[in-house]
Structure formats: C-alpha cells, structure tokens
Image (cartoon, coloured by chain):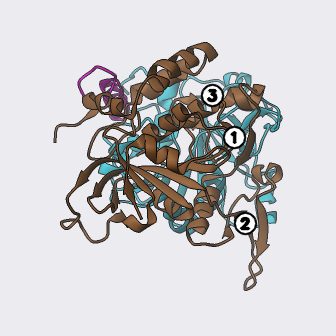
Chain colours: A brown, B cyan
C-alpha cells in the first residue's frame, strides 16, 4: 500500500544497485527530481529503460551509474545529441555501456505488454529497418490466422518505475494529465512504482470520470516535490524550460564542465530546490 | 510579378507546405517538417490534421514546438492520447495519410539514416536514432521528406537503415510485405524530387527559382537524374513568406521567453 515519504526515503526504499529501472516521461512530466536523488545516492550497475532518454539519463550515464540502456530515441529533442551518452557509447567513458535499441512503436508495445502481463508484444513493425539486424531482441512471429509475419519484442518489466504527476489525493491516488505518454503502462509494468507529485489535494471528487488516475494500491511511494520535473514541464503548473535544454548541449559537451555542473546543481542540492527553479515558468492562471 | 527576396530554406519550407492538402492527416516529424506543416495549416490547409508522436491529435500550435511534446501541442489539440495508442491505433491502424520526415542521411531511394555515422557497434558519431520513424515510414500511406542539400547528407550509401524507403529500388517494399507507397516526395532547399515510377530513384522534377542543375548536383552525393520536362517552383508569395516569418518570430520570442531569470 502506498506511503507518503520524503523523496530521499522513497528512492532509498525502492531502488537498489543492479536494478532495471524506468524513469519515464514523454517530454512532459519527466521525473528529474527522482533521478537527481538517485544520482545523489550513487547507485551503480543500473539498467536504464526509457523511450526518450534525455537530460536525466545523460546525467546518470555521465556519472557512471548505468551498465545498460534500453531506448528508442537517445537525443535532446529539438536540440541535438546527448553528449554524455555519446561519450559512453563511442569512447566507453566513464565506463562501457551496453545498448538495446528499439523504435518508439517497439517500446510502446513492449511497455503495454508488460502492463498486460504478457511475455512479449506483437505488432507490425521494423520492416526493412536496420535495428532488426543489430538487436537480437527484435524477432518475428507468424499470425496463426492470416500468415502475416509480425514483429515481436520481449515485454518490459522494470524492477521499479519512477514517474512525475500533477497531483495525488490524501489517500494516494494519482492524477496524470496532458501528454500522458507511457506513464500508466510503465507503472503497471513495474514491480514497484514511485511517483513524485506537484501537490496533494483533499480528494478527486470533482474530476471528470475518464481521466487518467492511478489507484493508490498500484503505487509504492509518493513524494511531494513541486517543480520536480524541471526543466521538463507539468501541464497546468509550469511550462517547459526550453532554454535549459539548449544550455545542456554546451554543459554536456565537456567532461569537466559536466562534472562541475553536476556537483553544483545535483550533488550539493536537495529535492527542495526544484520549486524555485520553476517559479519564472509558472503561467498566470 | 512582385519579387520578394527569400532564402533557400524559406523556399524549402514553403514548397513543402504546398504539398499538404486540407484533408490530410499528417504525422509530423520534428524540425523542418514541423515548420512546413504549420505553414500549410496557416495558409491553404486550415483544416489539416497535424499529429505529433507525443499523442497530440489535431494540434494547432501558435508557435513551433522545440520538442515533439511541448505543452502548446496538447493545449491546442482535438485530443491527446497515450503513446501506445498513438502508435497502435492511429499509426499502425492506417489512419495517417502523410508521414513527414526529416533526415540526417538520405539515399536516392528515400532510405533514411538518423542512427549512426560509421559502424553501428563502433560508431564514429552516435545520432539520436529512429524514434517513431521506422514505423511512420511503413505505416503512413505516403512519406514526404524534407532536408537541406549537402554532400554529407545526400549520399550514395547510407550507414544505417533507420527507416526504409524504397530499399534497393523497384518493388523492394512489396517484397518485404510493406503495402504502403513509401517516399513519394522530397523537398530540398534547391529542388522538388519525385521517385521514378519504375526504379523509384528520386528524380528532380522542379528547380526552385534561380537554382541551376549544377548547384543541385554539387550538393548531392549521387549522380542526379533530372526529369525531361523540368518545372520551376513558383517563388514564395508574400502571404506564404509573411506566415512563415511571423511563425518563426513568435517561436523565437516564446523559446527565449522561458529562459532562466526571465519573466514567462
């Protein structure tokens, strides 16, 4: 049953060295505060799963925490490349890293299969695509009814998934809205789920009945971290800090500059620092 | 005819926008396609359905998104769905008429590489990868591609098949069981290209105003074929240029406005 905990404790109780972990968020609601807490606690040998590993995985890879990464787009969206991830893949710095690369369709189907308790996902994909030649986990099955050859990938079953969401009610039910991405599937596919939220409200009584609400009994821990998805955004709370994404390109380009930035902005900080980072990004209602 | 000065990139975006129709359902790639699709929506195709892979269907952003998931896309969309639904029901389900893609590396058969330069396992440059493109390329009814011409970008042989165009040409798509048309249009900063009906090799069918065959060949890594009847692309109209420039100015102001320490 869900517990409301300080973020430090939520991360310590649910993440371990060697875990397979997803910090999900499709551009929106990226769980930056949770990732930074994991960095401060210094976990090692993680297998990091995410459709769009952006700044937080660039940071975790740059800090040497990942032994493997599973992804479908390893870029800084609209800006360019992820330079710490590139350094790891191209130069084995700061350590060598295994990669398992899919398409978005492949990973979306694999998460959904994980949520559905299936061993694999079947879909029409990867036809003529080079990924099928370099990733042994991309295989095929033949439809027993039509004979059509379809792609198959193993389902994704993380040990733990971290997401950020708008709000929880006092019982621990969680509301996600806006671009909902893959959050619901990533939570349901995982053994444990940790959610950071912008705020806690008394109840969800006045909500529309078809919204995306994650019931409290599928969540392990909730931590209240206002601004916790900066420099990503939280729909209805603050906008995306596009400038920070542009600036990251320069910070991550240099190994020493990266280390200095991580020391000043992650290692020596706490989850409480996130609220101030989004103050200028809050829209007047 | 009034002559308004324009850049090759503006010509590219505007020529690309003209290819889109009011009743198209277009899956929008980030970058150059995004500008073209929104210029189309703001000029001759007000009812076009623009879809971004973040799940936003029928979006009408006032500024161009930096990423494929900016809040503006969701706020102006007809509906926003989860990413698995996007790829399963809407793309794989056959609802997309045009997939509009950019490319880092392109060959003459419309195959695209955005994955690696060099060997996959020991890359010289690790690029972001395919994202939604591998299935956009095979599930959309047609594919349009837009990119600025360079010898590095338009090459005889791509390093990796991120998304499949016409493969080795001819009926290669059909042989792989792909039932959709694939790349039917390439718009560069110099020309408009269409695949040969039989070989499927991209052939220049229209040169942008003032562009020579020599310029097209010098910025392309394969031996360029030109159609016998070569058209000249109509220059951008004042309305098209104003629409594009206003959109880019709004976008620049909006993205800078979210900077640290500045008022939002």
- What SS does tag 1 mark? loop
Which of the 4 quarters of the picture holds residue B260? top left
**Mark 1 vs mark 2: same chain?**
yes
Q: Residue at x 41, y 42 (%)?
A: A7
Q: Residue at x 58, y 37 (%)?
A: A57
**Mark 2 vs mark 3: same chain?**
yes
Mainly helix, strand or loop, the magenta region?
helix
Badge 3 is on which residue?
A62
Of tags 1 and 2, the one toward the viewer is: 1
Q: Measure the C-alpha gap from mark 1 to mark 2.
A: 27 Å
**N-terminal-most mark, 2 or 3:** 3
Residue count near mark 3 (Cα–Cα under 10 Å), binned few <14, some 14–19, many ≥20: many
The answer to whether residue A182 of the structure is visible from this angle is no
Horizontally, residue B133 falls left or right of residue B176, namely: left
Badge 2 is on which residue?
A152
Q: Is residue B251 magenta?
A: yes
Protein chain holding label 3: A
- The relative height of residue A60 versus residue A169 in the rendered view (above or below) is above
State the image coordinates of residue B25 (x, y, percent, origin top left). Answer: 46, 58
**N-terminal-most mark, 1 or 3:** 1
Badge 1 is on which residue?
A45
- What SS does tag 2 mark? strand
Which residues, given as a range, are shown in magenta? B238-264
Which of the 4 quarters of the picture holds residue A52? top right
Horizontally, residue B157 falls left or right of residue A40, namely: right
- Residue B121's tag is none
**Mark 1 vs mark 3: same chain?**
yes
Farthest residue toward the left? Answer: A285
Protein chain holding label 2: A
Residue count near mark 2 (Cα–Cα under 10 Å), binned few <14, some 14–19, many ≥20: many
């Amino acid at each position: 049953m869900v517990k409301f905990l300080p973020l430090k404790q939520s991360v310590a109780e649910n993440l371990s060295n060697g875990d397979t972990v997803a910090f999900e968020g499709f551009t929106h609601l990226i769980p930056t505060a949770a990732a930074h807490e994991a960095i401060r606690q210094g976990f090692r040998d993680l297998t990091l799963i995410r459709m769009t590993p952006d700044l937080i995985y660039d940071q975790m890879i740059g800090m040497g925490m990942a032994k493997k990464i599973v992804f479908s787009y390893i870029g800084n969206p609209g800006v360019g490349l992820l330079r710490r991830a590139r350094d790891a893949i191209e130069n084995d710095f700061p350590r060598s890293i295994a990669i398992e690369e899919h398409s978005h369709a492949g990973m979306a189907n694999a998460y959904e299969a994980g949520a559905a308790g299936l061993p694999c996902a079947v879909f029409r994909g990867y036809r003529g695509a080079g990924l099928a030649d370099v990733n042994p986990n991309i295989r095929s099955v033949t439809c027993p009814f039509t004979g059509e050859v379809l792609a198959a990938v193993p389902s994704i079953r993380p040990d733990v998934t971290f997401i950020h969401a708008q709000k929880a009610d006092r019982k621990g039910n969680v509301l996600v809205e806006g671009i909902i991405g893959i959050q619901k599937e990533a939570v349901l596919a995982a053994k444990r789920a940790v959610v950071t939220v912008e705020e806690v409200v008394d109840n969800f009584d006045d909500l529309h009945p078809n919204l995306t609400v994650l019931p409290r009994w599928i969540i392990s821990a909730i931590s209240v971290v206002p601004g916790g998805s900066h420099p990503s955004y939280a729909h209805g709370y603050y906008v995306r800090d596009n400038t920070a994404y542009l600036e990251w390109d320069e910070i991550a380009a240099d190994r020493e500059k990266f280390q200095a930035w991580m020391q000043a902005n992650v290692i020596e900080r706490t989850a409480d620092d996130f609220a101030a980072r989004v103050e200028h990004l809050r829209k007047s209602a | 005819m009034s002559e308004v000065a324009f850049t090759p990139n503006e010509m590219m975006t505007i020529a690309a926008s003209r290819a889109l129709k009011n009743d198209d359902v277009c899956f929008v790639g980030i970058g150059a396609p995004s500008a073209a699709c929104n210029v189309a929506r703001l000029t001759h195709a007000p009812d076009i359905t623009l879809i971004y892979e973040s799940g936003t269907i029928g979006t009408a952003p006032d500024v161009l998104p930096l990423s494929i998931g900016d809040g503006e896309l969701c706020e102006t969309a007809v509906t926003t769905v989860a990413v698995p639904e996007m790829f399963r029901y809407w793309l794989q389900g056959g609802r997309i008429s045009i997939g509009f893609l950019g490319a880092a590396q392109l060959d003459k058969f419309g195959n695209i590489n955005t994955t690696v330069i060099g060997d996959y396992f020991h890359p010289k440059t690790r690029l972001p990868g395919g994202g939604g493109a591998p299935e956009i390329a095979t599930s959309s009814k047609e594919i349009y591609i837009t990119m600025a011409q360079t010898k590095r970008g338009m090459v005889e042989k791509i390093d990796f098949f991120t998304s499949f165009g016409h493969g080795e040409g001819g009926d290669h798509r059909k042989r792989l069981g792909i039932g959709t048309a694939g790349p039917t249009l390439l718009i560069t900063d110099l020309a408009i290209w269409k695949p040969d009906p039989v070989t499927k090799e991209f052939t220049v069918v229209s040169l942008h105003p003032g562009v020579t065959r020599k310029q097209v060949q010098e910025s392309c890594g394969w031996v360029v074929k030109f159609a016998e009847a070569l058209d000249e692309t109509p220059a951008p109209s004042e309305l098209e240029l104003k629409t594009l420039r206003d959109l880019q100015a709004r976008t620049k102001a909006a993205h800078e406005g979210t900077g640290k320490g500045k008022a939002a």
